[in-house]
Amino acid sequence: MKVFQGIDLVKVAKMEQAIRRSGKVFLDRVFSPGEQAYCGSKRMKFEHYAARFAAKEAVLKALKLRPRKGQKLSGIEVKRLATGKPFIALGAEARRRFRIPVSAQIELSLAHEREYAIATVVVVVP
């Protein structure tokens, strides 16, 4: 069994700036339609976007991968269970592209407040 860990911290103001500057192009490249709907419905939407961006970066760090220029991160999706617990959902293409086996278990923890958002990810590969 192998255990990989990644963590990322995002400044909410930088996320807001990126979204305001690049708009839909940035949102579509980084966030899934479900994530956009969820974050867009929140009063403090930039905090939620920043937390999800941190989660995607934490996944890449855990797997020791560097995002390539122009690479879509929307394939790494943060969803929520009925209880509210966030989790990482990967489609078949994202699993193949990021070399994550189907048997891998990915644990996620998110936190955010006005200035910063943080995510930590643990990937367990049997």
Image: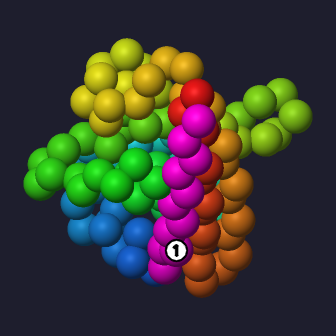
Question: What main secondary structure does the magenta stretch of the protein show?
Answer: strand
Please, which residue is most extreme toward the right here?
A: 83
Q: Which residue is mark 1?
A: 9
2 magenta-colored: yes
4 magenta-colored: yes
Q: Can the viewer see residue 64 in this picture?
A: yes
Q: Position of residue 10 (x, y in %)?
A: 48, 73
- Which of these two is toward me, 48 or 52? 52
From what the image shows, is residue 87 above or below residue 58? above
* Amino acid on which disc 1 is placed: Leu
- Which of these two is toward me, 92 or 23? 92
- Which of these two is toward me, 89 or 101? 101
Scheme by which the image is coloured: rainbow
For numbered disc 1, what is the local secondary structure?
strand
Q: Residue at x 50, y 68 (%)?
A: 8
For the record, the magenta segment spans 1-11
